[in-house]
Image: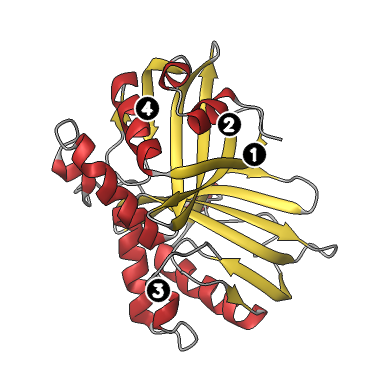
Amino acid sequence: MITHRFAEAAERRDGAAMAALFAEDVTYHTPTLTADLHGKELTLRYLAAGTRIVDDLTYTDQVSDDERLILFWTGILDQREISGATVLADEIGGLIHDITVLQRPWGVTENFRDGILPALADAVPLPAWQLDDRKAPAPDPGAGAGQRPGGPLALAPDVALHSAMLTKTLHSQENVAAYHELIDGIQGPREYLARFTPAGRLVEYWSCVLDGHLLQGIDDCKLDGNGRVTDQTAWLRPWPVVTVLRDRAVAAGLPFLTADYWRLPAGPSHLP
């Protein structure tokens, strides 16, 4: 059940209700920009631009701990389904001080970026839409970064992966394991920011550094009675860094990832 006022305000496109949720000094880690937005005015402007172009916005699920809440949602952009995870944190005095949004799949997020850029071009400088030249500090493996308690998750024989970059679901233990190995090799060590463990489920929120650029992700895994992953969905941000990851994954040429896994279908499409 979705209980947070943010989801209600976003679904109704209620600007006044949305404005009442944020602190004046809120920081927004957007799905498309490599630079964060600071302040309530810019945050609301970006959110308004996004909700204007995404139809049928529906919040479907949530997980939370004492520090943050993750809201999962779907919508339609130009007859293509888009999915996201919105992380709300630092809710001090009932006001949100930190918001992060991750999206999938890559191709529709690209269209999302193109759709909101004109509405924000006068307020957000062009470098923020591109790879920045700042170097994020790499996770410290000695501090446990990149180490999942108990080691890698076991995969069920019929596991299904709904990637943040692929346009089709990937099936089978062999193919999903090979995809994981490829992506882990490109990303390098992860720092796990939060872990949620509802019954039969594991949600992990993490970050890593790719060529000095911050990349963040959320993985939502359904588990069988033996703790094996039967279904995994992934969301990533920000778009320019995800593009680097995608380009390298394409170049690796895994034989089972044919061109139709990377391209959006020509017509209307639903997420796998």
Q: Amino acid at mark 2?
A: Arg
Considering only vertical position in the picture, is 45 above or below 25? below
Quadrant into which the C terminus falls: bottom right
The three-letter amino acid code for the residue at tag 3 is Trp
Decide: few, some or many residues near mark 2? Use Cα within 10 Å; few <14, some 14-19, many ≥20.
some
Q: Residue furthest top?
A: 93
Task: Answer whether residue 52 is visible to the viewer in this image.
Answer: yes
Q: Residue at x 42, y 63 (%)?
A: 187
Crowdedness near tag 4: few (<14), some (14–19) or many (≥20) residues, C-alpha within 10 Å: many
In the rendered image, residue 176, in percent from the top left (x then y), is placed at 59, 75
Question: Which residue lies under the disc numbered 3?
Answer: 262
Most foreground residue, 213 or 63 = 63
Any mark on residue 68, and which? 2
- Disc 1 to disc 2, how far (Cα)? 11 Å
Mark 1 vs 2, N-terminal side: 1
- Using the rendered image of the protein, determine whether residue 153 is visible from the camera's viewpoint: no
Marks 4 & 1, CB-CB < 8 Å contact: no
Residue 207 position in % (x across, y down): 46, 49
Q: Residues within 10 Å of mark 3 (few under 14, many from 20)?
A: some
The residue tagged 4 is 27
Q: Residue at x 32, y 35 (%)?
A: 49
